[in-house]
Amino acid sequence: MKWCRFDSNGQGVYGIIEGETVTEVSGSPFDTYTKTDRTKALNAVKLLVPVIPATFYAAGINFREHVTEIAHQRGEEPNFPPAADVGYRANNALAAQGEPIIVPSDATEVLQYEGELVVVIGKKCKRVSEAEALDYVFGYTIGNDVSERTWQHGDRTLWRGKNTDTFKPMGPWIVTDGIDPENCEVSISLNGKKLYQYNMSGAIFSARQFISRMSQYLTLYPGDVLWMGTDGAQENMKDGDVCDIAIEGIGVLSNPIQWEK
Amino acid sequence: MKWCRFDSNGQGVYGIIEGETVTEVSGSPFDTYTKTDRTKALNAVKLLVPVIPATFYAAGINFREHVTEIAHQRGEEPNFPPAADVGYRANNALAAQGEPIIVPSDATEVLQYEGELVVVIGKKCKRVSEAEALDYVFGYTIGNDVSERTWQHGDRTLWRGKNTDTFKPMGPWIVTDGIDPENCEVSISLNGKKLYQYNMSGAIFSARQFISRMSQYLTLYPGDVLWMGTDGAQENMKDGDVCDIAIEGIGVLSNPIQWEK
C-alpha cells in the first residue's frame, strides 16, 4: 500500500493512494482507520509530511565513502562508527513534498543535500532480534537531511546545521510493500542532473541492526522514523536549485531551495 | 495556575490543580480547553508526564561547575560553550512522577541524576528578542536528566547514555506563575538527604537567551520543552535509591531507581 497525509480543509488527514487517486481515511494507519468515500486526484491534493514522528531518529554517519569525504573536508582521518549508535533530528525542521527549503540569510554556501531512505516504524518494539526487526516496520519513505556544514561542524550540537526550519524534507508518501531496505537504489539530482547514486547494501549498519540495537534500550513506537544516512560526496545547493531524491519503488522527493535575502 | 496530566479511565487528560483537588479539562492548555465538572483528589490520580513535546530540547552543559566536574572526570580541561547551542532528548525516555527509573542490567555504576528546571513553551515562536522571549513560555516543570556516564562518553551519540527508556523523568506538574527562571533554587536529594543545591542565576545561558537564539533558526511550538541543564557534581545512584529534585514554587519530582537483574 501507498500511504500519504494531505490537507483536507485545513486538517491533516491520512490517505491511501491507488494509481492517481487518493482515498481519505478517518483515523491513522498507526492505530485504527476506516476508508471514507471521499476521493481526490493525487495531483490535486496538497501533500503533507507523511508522518509526524514521536521520536525522529537518524543513523547519521552510516556509509564509508560519506565518512571519508567529510573527514577529508575537515583534514582528518576517517573514523568509522564502531556500533549502530543512533542520533536525532527535530520535527520543527520537517517539510513536505514540494515545499521550499528556506535557507537563513546568514547561512554559508556549504549547504548540502543528503538523500536518505527513511524507515517508518509500525508496531511498538522493545528488545527484538535482528531477524525479527523488520516485522516492526510499517513502510519506507524518502528524506533529505539538508545540512549547513559550517554550522554542523562549528556549533556544539547539530541544532541549526541540521534542524533549521525546513531542513528536513520527508515524503512524498510511505510505501509499505516491495522495498528491500538492504538493497535499493537511492539517487540524488540537482536541477534534473543526476549527481550521485548508491545502493543501501553499502550501509555500515542495516535497518535491522539499528532497530534491534536501539530496541535493547528504548521502545520504538508506531510512527517513529529512522533516517538511514547517505553515501558519497555532496555538492552545494544555491538559491533556486531543485533537489530531487529518488528511491526505486517509492518515488521522488523534490524540494526547491529558497535563500532568504 | 498549576496544570497536570493524569490517567482518566486509561486516557491521558489534562487537569487543573487547586489545592489538593484536580479538575479534569477537555482539550489542552496548549490549544483550547473547557473545564469539566469532574474533580478528583490530587493524591488519588495517577499523574502522567505533564506534556509530550513535539520537540524535546535540552541545554546540556550550561553551568560552569558542572562543565568543570565532567571535564575533570575525563582528565580534560573544561571547555565552556561559546553560544546557546541547544541539544535534544527523546520522548521514549520520559517517565512520570513516581515512576521507576529502570536501569538495564548492562549499565555501569556511573548512573547519575541531573536535576533541572524545564521551560514549557506556550505559543508558537519565531525570531523573538531576548526581551520578549519569556512571553512565549507557558510555564515551568522539573526534569531529571538521568545519565549513564560510560555510555554518554563512550558512544558516538547520547542515545542510550541519556535516552534509555525511563531516563527522563519530568513533572510532577507545570506551574504557570510566580517562577523566575533566572533566579530560582534547585535542590537534589537522594534517599531524603540533600546532596546539592544551586540557583538558576548561575546558568551560562538563560532561558531567554536560549529561546531567542533558537527562534532565529527554528520555530518553537506550544508544548515543546527546554531542559535548562544542571549545576555541580553528581553522585551515583544504585538500585532502590529514590531521587528527588525540588524547585521552589513548583514542587518535588520523585523517582525510585530500579536496576534490572
Image (cartoon, coloured by chain):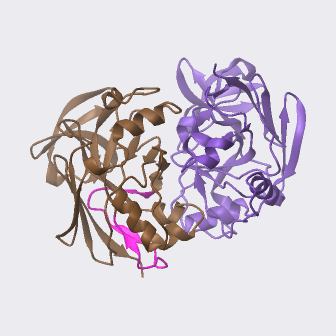
Chain colours: A brown, B purple
- Give left or right: position of B169 versus A19: right
Q: Residue at x 86, y 50 (%)?
A: B198
Whether residue B57 is situated above or below residue A1 in the rendered picture: below
- Give left or right: position of A57 versus B52: left
Residue A31 visible in the current orientation: no
Farthest-out residue, bottom: A261
Quadrant the N terminus of chain B occupies: top right
Farthest-out residue, front: A77
The quadrant where residue A99 appears? bottom left
Principal SS element in the magenta part? loop
Quadrant the C terminus of chain B occupies: top right
Counting from the top left corner in percent of width and height, residue A15 is at 23, 40
Q: Residue at x 49, y 45 (%)?
A: A85
Counting from the top left corner in percent of width and height, residue A237 is at 32, 74
The quadrant where residue A166 appears? bottom left
Counting from the top left corner in percent of width and height, residue B40 is at 69, 20
The front one of A145 and B24 is A145
Q: Residue at x 72, y 33 (%)?
A: B109
- Give left or right: position of A49 versus B96: left
Q: Which residues are magenta?
A: A93-113
Counting from the top left corner in percent of width and height, residue B37 is at 62, 24
Farthest-out residue, left: A19
